[in-house]
Structure formats: structure tokens, C-alpha cells
Image (cartoon, coloured by chain):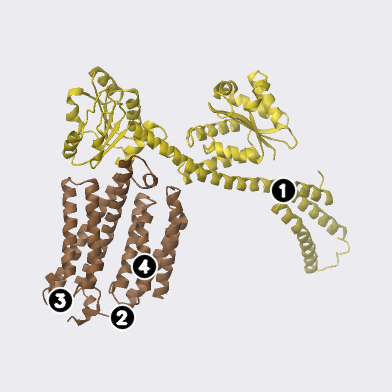
Amino acid sequence: MHDACLWTALAFYALGILLIVPSVVQRRPSLSPASLGALGIGLAAHAAALAIEAARIHRLPVTDVRSALSFYAFMVTLAFFFVYLRYRIVSLGLFMLPLVFLLTLISVLRPVGSFDSSAFRGGWLLVHISSIFLGYTALFLTFVAAIMYLIQERELKSKAPRGFYYRLPSLKVCEEIYYRSLVLGLPFLSVGILTGFVWASRTWKGPWEFDPKILASMVTWVIYLVLFATRVSGGWHGRRAAYFAIFGFLAILVTFVGISVLSGQHGYIPKLREMP
Amino acid sequence: MNLTLLGINHRTAPVEVREKMNIPADHLTEAVSDLVHRAGIREGMILSTCNRVEVTTSAEDEVDAESIIRRFLADHHHCDLGQFAHFFYRLRQQDVVKHLFRVASSLDSMILGEPQILGQLKQAYATARSAGAMNGTLNDVVNQTLAVAKRVRRETALGTAAVSVSYAAVELAKKIFGGLQGKTIFVVGAGKMSELAAKHLLSSGASNILVSNRTYERAVELAAAFHGTAVPFENLYEHLSHADIVISSTGSPRPIINKNQVEKLLSVRKNRPIFFVDIAVPRDVDPSVNELDNVFVYDIDDLGHVVEANKKQREHEAVWAEQIIQEEVQKTLKRLASREVVPTIVALEDRLNTIRATEMERYQGRLAGMTPEQRQAVDALTRGMMNKILHGPITELKSGAGEPENAALVRLIHKIFGLGS
């Protein structure tokens, strides 16, 4: 049942994305009801899949790579709807949703994780995980806005407007989305990381401070703190800030995906079972 | 349906002919009224703008509306139309529908996608209506025309990209700053072109304007016209940091704004973007300024390139618009045609109903002994037979609506069922 829902979500996401293409090509001021409908159905099916999984394991379904990716894809789609309703940027769909499709596809194809770890119980960890996911979602938006900014900036600097010039929002709007999502994402990331430290120091044995994933998330955190600070102090606008935001998101990717494999304590590897 | 359109436009006729054929707005009601009171004409509309004069009519079948329109124009302008005959184009039936759709959507305009034509058409329609010249097919067609023009506007970007240099500057400013609310414009060197650009920027929402000129009096004059502030030319650099958009057109032989100065400006402005519109030749802003982050410099040629790209963009959008129009023409023709077969269908139903009623009447006496149930059964039986017989011809009529062969079918049905003319 869970898999059927997830497959349905995947199919409708694909349909929704395909239906966005003509709207972007033809520069429609808003998405067609068909593509919004398809994405809406996809989102609903995805929500159902998550609910079924949550009911099965009795907690937030983020206990293995498969479910974590699925959950993240769901959050990004949700974020897309929010931003679309506020800004009506048709092309945003083509920047955000292919990731959703990819993540959903991966989580559909991976086998279900069978472990049931008591480590995933408890309030601290719930706060830790949900904050991290909210933070990652918002910062993905920062990343997308930074890319759109860079493309539009290049169009304007080149003085020979091509397709993107007409289809992307103004630099001002890109910066606004960028900044708002950064302001939203940073506190969540901070709470997520801090609760993670607290939880780790209480639960894990040994020198948790040197776990690669924890070090990587520290680096990520510092990048975003710098970005925020320079922005507040007024110095960093434009291209430089956009490059830094992209760098920040790459750090997230390294933390989230790369280090999960290396990390001893962390990551979605059955090693968790060995813990007390 | 008998639709005819006779007209001239900027492509078929020179301005001397267009102005001769022009019917001024204050004579329009009278003219339309004259037109529709001519024998055979049911409805009429006159669209008269500086680029086109078009007379559209819906006439009774078999009426030669073209000659009537020619005579009407000759009478109205008190001239012999013969000398102008070759400037006119004449369209009939579905070509009229398509032409009106294209005109209203600004696909037939001198500047592709310009928005005025729709307003002018609305005005022509309102005038025709108030003159009582709109009450049937043409009324439907024009109503549909307005809807199609709106659809084209909604679903394509035909009218969006700026196609003049000064509007291109506004469009670029919007691509950089989003809205222009609260933005400050600095006009350096007063000239016709910078004045025009400043005017467009102000009407798009920019709030403050500073003006500087080598002759201070001219700056004061222009500043007063825009409710702005004049800045002495010596103090130019001090005020430059307030400006989000700088429109420059001095007669200086070498650049007056260089990279170093702008770098300083940026640090004062905490890197808020600056947009230089450099209309001067030779240029006022050193081209290397464009290399700086958050600074955008467009000279007159750059603006020209944007306009060119935008024109291409409009042509590209026109392809989508033509597709929409094609589709809408088909839909409209189908609807008009199915309306044309309605009288035949009604007459046919009436005819069979009359037969049924007469026969029931005739057998009244012999059916008298039946129970109410039996009577109901006979009623249902005859009605059922009637509907079965009608089904074939009605389906044929409807499915063939709009096809040329349908006229023969209509005549045939009239003949074999004795429906009168």
C-alpha cells in the first residue's frame, strides 16, 4: 500500500513536471490547472505514503535513507507550492521539482529498511530530525534562488536577452526568496544541530565530537552563519552571496549524503543497532 | 450567415488614402446607423483608426453586401471610390471572423502586440450597439472577438516585451529592481530621450528624481517639470550614491563616470544595485563599469539590441497566438453553423408533431373505448415513432453543420417533408 502510494506520487510528479514545460516555454503567467492538479495529487499520494509508513513504524518516517529521501521530497514539493502561491514564478517548478522526482524515484527503488531502532524514539531526536529537515528544505530554496539569480544576472550583464531573461523573475525577487528562505532555514538548522549535539553527548559512547557527519554539519552551519551575518551587515549582495549559498548547499549534500556512509555513529546504517 | 468586411489598412494603403477614408469618432454613430438602414443589411460595425478603416456587415442571404458597403463609403466621403478600389481588401464569411480575431489580438497591427487596437475595437462595437446595429450573428462574432483577444493576451506574452528604447530601459530596470517603487532616478544631462525615459520610469512607480545639467537653469527647469530636485553639475558625484537608476546623456567627449568612482559608490550604497542607462554618444559611462558586481550598464546600442530581441520574442509569441486564433475560429464557425440548422430542426419537429396531432384527432372516435392505460400506450407509441424518424435527419443536420454540402441537405429535408421555404 505504501509502495503503491509512492509510485502514484512519482507518476503524478512526473506528469506535473512535464505539464510545466509548455507553460514555461510559452511564458504563461501562471501554471496550468492540469499541472497544478497533477502535482497536488502527487503531493496527496505522497502524504498518504508517509502516513502509512508512520503508522507502521510508529514514528516520523525518517529512519532510513529511503524514507528520509521520500520525506525530504515531500517537504520540497510543499515548499514549492508555498512559494508558487506567493510569487507565481512558473519556471520555479523546473528548478525545484526535478529533485523531487529524483528523490522519490530513489526511495521507490530502494528496498524497505527493516530495522527498528529504539534510538529513534524520544523527544530530542524528533526535534533534531524535524528541524534539520525544515532547515534543509528552506536552504534548498536559498540554493535555487541563488541559481536563478546568477542566471538572470548573467542575462542582464550579457545585454543580449535570451530565453531565461523573459522567464526568470527579477533579481530583486530572486534575492527576496533567497534571503527569506535563508532567514527561515538558519534557525531550524541551528536548532537541529544543537539538539543533535545534546542528544549525541547523552547517548553515544566515545568521542562523538569527531564524528565526520558532526564535523561536516558544523562546517555547513558556519557557512550559513557567515552568509547571514554578511547579509545583515549589508555588505554582501548579488553574485558573491549567490555563489556562497550554492557552496553552502553543497556542504549540506556532503553532510547528508556523503558522510552518512562514512560516519560510524550516524547515518542510516544498521550500526545504530549496536548502540545501547 | 452572410458576413462581409471591406477595409484598408497600413499595409494596403498609404496614409493619404487612409486619412481620406477615415470616419471620425463624432460621425461614427450616424454613419453606422446609415449603413444598417440600407436595404439588405442587418448589422454593421465601423472600425476607424489611424492605421485602418474597416466596415463589417452581416446581411440577408443572397445580398451583395460588398457593393452596398462601397456605395456607403462613396456616399459618406462624397467621392468616387473607383480610384481607391485597389487599396481595399474584401473578406467574406469565415475570413471575416478570422480577420476580426487577428485584428483584435493585435496580430495585424503595425507594431505586433500593441494594446490600443483592442480598446479601439471595443469602442467601435459600443458605438454600433448604441446605434442599434448589433443584434444577431455579427454581434456574436464581435463578442467572441473580444473574448479571443483576452485569451491571447492571457495565454501568450505577445504584448509584454518592450519594443521601444525608452520602454526597454523601464523593462530592464524592473528586471533588476523588481518594482520601481521608492527608487531614485538621476538624470544627468537633460535631453529629449533621457526626458522620455525618466517619464516612463516615473509612471512605472519610481518616486524620486534628481536632475543635473551643465547649464543649471535647464536642470532646474526639467526638475520642476518632474517635481524633482536640481543638482549643480559640480556636486554630481556627491549625489550619485542616492541614485538607483542613472540616465546619462551629456555631451562630454570622454566618460564622466569610471570604474573607480562606481566602486566607491557601491561601498557607500552597501552594494545595492545601480543601473546606468547611458544614452550619450560618445558614451558617458566607461564600459568597464559593467564588470562590477551589482552594476548594470546599458548604452544606446545595448538598448537597441534588447528591443530587437524583444521584437523577435513577440514574433515568436505570435505563432502561439495564431494557433489560438485558428482554434477559436473553428469553434466559432461550428457554433454559428449549428445555429443555422436550428430553424430547420424546429420546423421538422413541428411538422411531425402536427401530423401526429392530426392523426390522433382523426382516430379520436375509434379510440374512445380504450382504458387510460391503453390511451397512454398509444400516445407513447406514436411519440416514439416520431422521435425515431426524427433522429436520423437531426443527427445528419447537426453533424454536417458548417460544411458546404449541408445547404443541399437542408434544402432536401425542406423538400421531402414539405417544410415550406
Label 2–label 1 contact, CB within 8 A: no
Between the C-alphas of marks 2 and 4, the distance is: 19 Å
Between the C-alphas of marks 3 and 4, the distance is: 31 Å
- What is the quadrant of the C terminus of chain B in the image? top right
Between the C-alphas of marks 2 and 1, the distance is: 70 Å
| Kind of residue indicated by mark 2 | Ser
Instruction: Give chain B's shade.
Output: yellow
| Kind of residue indicated by mark 1 | Val
Between the C-alphas of marks 3 and 2, the distance is: 22 Å
Mark 2 belongs to chain: A
Residue B37 seen in the figure: no
The residue singled out by tag 2 in the image is A114
| Kind of residue indicated by mark 3 | Thr
Spot occupied by residue A171 in the image (x, y as percentages of width and height): 30, 45
Indicate the secondary structure of the residue bearing disc 4: helix
- Locate residue B125: give its quadrant: top right
Label 3–label 2 contact, CB within 8 A: no
Q: Nearer the viewer, mark 3 or mark 4?
A: 4
The residue singled out by tag 1 in the image is B341
Q: Which chain is brown?
A: A
Mark 3 belongs to chain: A
The residue singled out by tag 4 in the image is A104
Q: Nearer the viewer, mark 4 or mark 1?
A: 4
Label 4–label 1 contact, CB within 8 A: no
Q: Residue at x 23, y 71 (%)?
A: A260
The residue singled out by tag 3 in the image is A203
